[in-house]
Amino acid sequence: MRFDSRVTPTQTEIETIDGRRVALKLVVNPRARRVSVRIDPTRREAIATAPSSRQLKLAVRFAAERAGWIAHELERL
């Protein structure tokens, strides 16, 4: 997958319901049509993808809403 070379991935953290902090990698992909969250099993990290840098805050909110799912999936790895 090829990403826009002008925008580098950013790291942030989100908090789960039980107070744990989960690392989240933010990526801008101009080919994306919507905000999405996925788990990379090889690197054992959560990745939130946004179609533009203007929607990165939305991507963080979207991932925060799914923090429980993210923590559960990372535990399974």
Image (cartoon, rainbow, N blue to C red):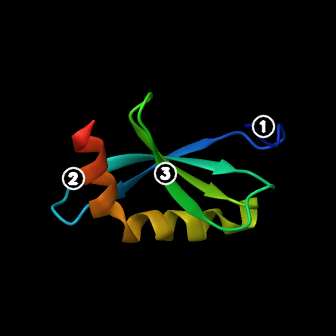
Q: Position of residue 19 (x, y in %)?
A: 19, 59
Q: Could you tell me which quadrant the C terminus lies in?
A: top left
Q: Identify the residue at horizontal 63%, vertical 62% (top origin).
A: 56
- The residue nearer to you, when weighing 68 against 61, is 68
Q: Identify the residue at horizontal 58%, vertical 71% (top origin).
A: 58
> Quick one: SS at disc 1?
loop
Q: Position of residue 53 (x, y in %)?
A: 73, 59
Q: Are marks 3 and 1 in contact (CB under 8 Å)?
A: no
Q: Is residue 2 above or below residue 18?
A: above
Q: Does residue 15 appear in the picture of this structure?
A: no
User: Could you give the CA–CA distance between mark 2 and mark 1, rounded to whole angstroms?
Assistant: 32 Å
Label 2: how many residues lie within 10 Å, few (<14), some (14-19) or many (20+)? few
Label 3: how many residues lie within 10 Å, few (<14), some (14-19) or many (20+)? few
Q: Are marks 2 and 1 in contact (CB under 8 Å)?
A: no
Amino acid type for the residue under numbered disc 2: Arg
User: Could you give the CA–CA distance between mark 2 and mark 3, rounded to whole angstroms?
Assistant: 19 Å
Label 1: how many residues lie within 10 Å, few (<14), some (14-19) or many (20+)? few
Q: Name the residue tied to disc 2.
A: 20
Please tell me the numbered disc located at residue 2.
Answer: 1
Res 39 → quadrant:
top left
